[in-house]
Image (cartoon, helix red, strand yellow):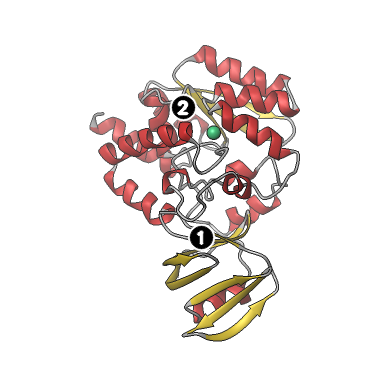
Amino acid sequence: MNKIEAKYINELHVAGIWRQDLLSVIFNLRPCFRLEINDKNLTFLKRRLSGLNLKMTTYIYPPAQKLTAIIGKNKLILDQAKNIDLSFSGYHRIFKMGKILGYPECCINEFIKEFIARQNLPLFSLKNCIRKDKLDFKLNYLYSFETRVLAHPSTELNKLNRLDYLGWNKYLIPHIPCSFECRTSKKYAQKPFSIIKKYSPNYVQELKFYLKNPILFINDYEFIIFKGRVNNNSIIYKKIINPNNLTKKPFLNMVNRGNQIVINNGNIQVFKNNVLLKTFKKGAILFNFK
Ligand SMILES: [Zn+2]
């Protein structure tokens, strides 16, 4: 990759077309990717993409009434993806879109199965793990809020948008894995990881900073990232990182005062040096990414 291309990728990333997605199509890891897009700087985006030998097709996706783009190398595939998106609905659409976007079939099928239940999505990837105590950070998709669009109204996403949430594009895999142990997803995740490491070492550090820490998960939009150590249902922590998602302020303030959390029978207990500060009557799950 030459300097101009690196510059274009930077500019597109700043404009909301993420580096890892661009690299994944440039290096043929997958045929195309889909995203909602802002129509304000469309000409600029198209020019930059064509400087990277990439093409973009845009259309209004009716259910969301949002301008949507498919980006990739091959115009034929982009048109196919657009057709699928516009002509199919429900599970047919999810399956066909997943296939053309290059997602593993095991993950698409599991998503369809769990989509019916409409639960908070990361929970099913965890449910299907045999060893829940140490999860591969490369499959951490908790910051990929685009994955929640189907299961939730976009009001939550709009709120996050207004908060200028910094963690939003931190992911290596674009899809929801059938399990955090999914072999196909692990094999896939290693590829963008190596490519980003080579071409954008600073960005790999940034990704690791987010992906490699334990997360206290309350729901799809409320979770806290810790510098700390998990032991079963408890975490001892030094500090919390970038909490400006939709986690409630009083809870966050209490967690900031403490240094240990225990999840106990659907309650969250916050401790400071073994002294109980407060019990919150809400359920949570610890995701121990490493
Ligand atoms: Zn899978």
**What is the x, y in percent for residue 69?**
57, 29
Q: Are marks 1 and 2 in contact (CB under 8 Å)?
A: no
Q: Quadrant of residue 176?
A: top right
Q: Closest to the observer: 287 or 142? A: 287
Q: Is residue 247 above or below residue 153?
A: below
- Ligand 1 is found in which quarter of the picture? top right
Callout 1: 10 Å neighbours few (<14), some, many (20+)? many
Q: Kindly identify the amino acid type of the residue bearing the numbered disc 2.
A: Lys
Which disc is residue 46 wearing? 2
Q: Quadrant of residue 116?
A: top right
> What is the tally of numbered marks visible in this picture?
2
- Cβ at disc 2 under 8 Å from ligand 1: no
Q: Closest to the observer: 174 or 232? A: 232
Residue at the limit of the structure toward the left, as seen here: 2
Secondary element type, mark 2:
helix
Q: Check the picture and name the quadrant holding the C terminus.
A: bottom left
Residue at the limit of the structure toward the front, as seen here: 130
Q: Is residue 276 left or right of residue 283?
A: left
Residue at the limit of the structure toward the bottom, as seen here: 275
Q: Is residue 46 left or right of residue 150?
A: left
Task: Please tell me which residue is depicted at 50% across the width and 81% down the height of the picture.
Answer: 257
Task: Please tell me which residue is depicted at 45% across the width and 48% down the height of the picture.
Answer: 170
**What is the x, y in percent for residue 266?**
68, 68
**What is the x, y in percent for residue 60?**
67, 29
Which disc is residue 203 wearing? none
Pair 1/2: label in front: 1
Q: Is residue 79 above or below residue 275?
A: above
Residue corresponding to mark 1: 215
Q: Kindly identify the amino acid type of the residue bearing the numbered disc 1.
A: Ile
